[in-house]
Amino acid sequence: MPGTFDRIQPRGGRRARATAADILLALVLAALALPVTVMTTVASGGAPFWAPVTIAAFGALHLLAAVVRYSPTAALAGGAALMLGLTALSFPGFPTTAVLMPSSAAFLVLVFAAAGSDSRWLGWSALVVGLAGAAFIVAVVVARAEVTDLAGLLAMAGFLVASIGAAWAGGRYRRELLRKRSAEDVARTQAAELRLRRDRELIAEDRRRIGRDVHDVVSHSLAVMVAQAEAARVLLGSDDAGARAAVEHVVATGRSALADMRGLVTAFADDPAGRGIDGGPAASHRAPQSPSPRLADLHALVASASGPQRTVRLVIEGSAWPVSPGLETAVYRIAQESLTNTLKHTAPPTLSRVLLRWSPTELTVTIDDDGGPIPEKDPPAPLRGGRGVDGMRHRVLQHDGMLQAGPQPGTPRGWSVVARLPRPAVPSTDSILPAGADRAGADA
């Protein structure tokens, strides 16, 4: 993407603080070059102002080399001005060529720093100023006639150009190296953020899935328990055996719901580090969890939803083909939520049907009911939507299917849920047909 790398700052930014390494390098350079420069300047004689001005100019140049990190632009401008002044002090009539003294190497540090900055304009300016300065120095040397032969002149010019070029190239290389490291840091940070986001999405999806399962288990179990308790109340005194059976059904359903809830809540409370809600090992490490519901469990589901004045049929049409455990769980939960809605929103007696229709290309799951008796004052039919229908729709979409939920045609108060689940391209090796399931038209 154009401009992406332009926004990547080298470590330290445009206006970085001078590091100990920068100051140490400047001190080493000054310790090596400045004494020779001072002795040469003093020994050369000349006008009284010449030596102090020259030494002061080189001292300032070394100082700029120490603080160039604060502002490469100002340091390069100041260094260029000092080098121009030193070149002027090298004109014919002065004792020696001041600009070629050892301390001039400090200007290379400024070129290096400017070339290594994040500013392209400053980097190219450093190269242009350096080469222009080299040409000016060569012109001064020619004017002073200090080098008379062509070979010597070319050697000096080549040395100056090579020095400027090497300093500039070194700065550019350092700039690209820092940019590369910065880009790698950004890439690592982005990769870590993506991994964290992906982990959070997975955790959120797991929590949503467990939330849907908790909703399905609680809603169905409570609806069954309420329906069976009402049946026991009606049968009490007239059919004690039936009332007792209804109460036993309530107890069994409650125990089953508690077992399911214990596994779901424990899994929900386990954190990513593998610790459970009690600080110990996660549930998955302490004991195996109950298996997810399968199509073979539909008989037990239908039986739990059945009761006095509540008739539920399980009907299967067509030849079954293997499906994945996830699809089996989705079918079970859709049937469970639909039967729960029937228990919650209809009054007995009711007739419900769970139909599995297998075709070569899809599995159609239909759960419908007759809506129960019509009251004397027929109120508006309740909307069986909300979280339950949203959960069913989400389960169907996970398998690229379609869900329809609404009033059942042909009945005054009936309701129908139809889920169409396409046959996966890669067949499953699992066996899925509910054991003992009845074929078309047979009651379960």
Image (cartoon, rainbow, N blue to C red):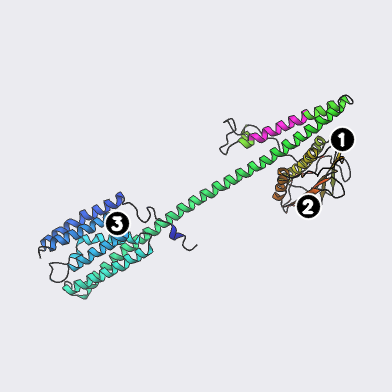
Percent of width and height locating residue 89: 17, 67
The residue at the point 45 percent across, 55 percent down is 183
Q: Secondary structure at mark 1?
A: loop
Residue bounds of the magenta highlight: 251-266
Magenta-colored stretch includes residue 265 = yes
Q: Secondary structure at mark 2?
A: strand
Give the answer, above or below, for where 190 lies relative to 84.
Answer: above
Specify whether residue 444 is in view: no
The residue at the point 65 percent across, 32 percent down is 287
Please give the residue where the numbered disc 3 appears in the rendered image.
68
Please give the residue where the numbered disc 1 appears in the rendered image.
309
Q: Amino acid at mark 1?
A: Gln
The residue at the point 29 percent across, 56 percent down is 68
CA–CA distance in space, label 2 to label 3: 73 Å
Question: Can you tell which of label 1 and label 2 is closer to the viewer?
Answer: 1
Question: Does the residue at mark 2 contact the one at mark 3 (Cβ under 8 Å)?
Answer: no
N-terminal-most mark, 2 or 3: 3
Give the answer, above or below, for where 99 lies relative to 289.
Answer: below
Quadrant of the snapshot with the C terminus: top right
Categorize mark 3 by other alpha carbons within 10 Å: few (<14), some (14-19), many (20+). Answer: many
Question: Does the residue at mark 1 contact the one at mark 3 (Cβ under 8 Å)?
Answer: no
Q: Is residue 326 left or right of residue 195?
A: right
- The mark found on residue 441 in the picture is none
Please give the residue where the numbered disc 2 appears in the rendered image.
362
N-terminal-most mark, 1 or 2: 1
Q: Amino acid at mark 2?
A: Glu
Q: Amino acid at mark 3?
A: Val
Specify whether residue 358 is in view: yes
CA–CA distance in space, label 1 to label 2: 33 Å
Quarter of the figure with residue 299: top right
